[in-house]
Image (cartoon, rainbow, N blue to C red):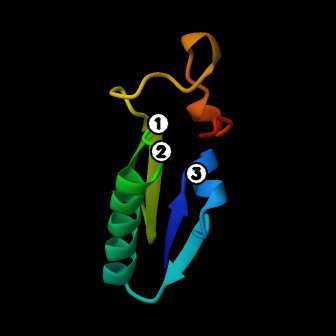
Amino acid sequence: MYTVYMENECGCFKKSEFEKEKSFDTQREAYQYSNALAEHMNEDFCGKHLFVSEKMDGNVFMIRVGDNPNFGSCGTGGESSCSSGSCGC
């Protein structure tokens, strides 16, 4: 069993139909899903964040979220709150 996890859920992700964790029977399915989901979020979400799919140890793929440097910061006072998972879109 292979699992795709969302590292932190931004507001756009929480509003979407996607799940924070999804399991697959094969590594290929998990790989394809994690890459397609990251690409979809980068293209269709608000643009405050960048999403990257990463293969982790074991049978895990992680979709990481970070600030989009071309958009500006998402925290208060210019500091990012993305690492805590508390920022929203």
Q: Position of residue 75 (x, y in %)?
A: 60, 22
Q: Which residue is mark 1?
A: 48
Q: Earlier in the sequence, mark 1 or mark 3?
A: 3
- Residue at 33% x, 27% y: name it: 70
Q: Amino acid at mark 3?
A: Cys
Residue occupying the point 55% across, 27% down: 74
| Amino acid under disc 1 | Lys
Query: Which badge, 3 or 2, is on the more N-terminal residue?
Result: 3
Q: Amino acid at mark 2?
A: Cys
Q: Is residue 49 above or below residue 30?
A: above
Proximity of marks 1 and 2: CB atoms separated by less than 8 Å: yes
Q: Position of residue 32 (x, y in %)?
A: 32, 75
In this figure, which residue is indicated by the disc labeled 3?
A: 12
How far across and how far down the image is residue 11, in percent?
A: 63, 47
What kind of element bears circle 2? loop
Quadrant in the rendering for residue 20? bottom right
The residue drawn where x is 51% and y is 73% is 3
Where is mark 2, residue-wise?
46
Does the CB distance between marks 1 and 3 fall below 8 Å?
Answer: yes
Nearest to the observer: residue 86 or residue 12: 12
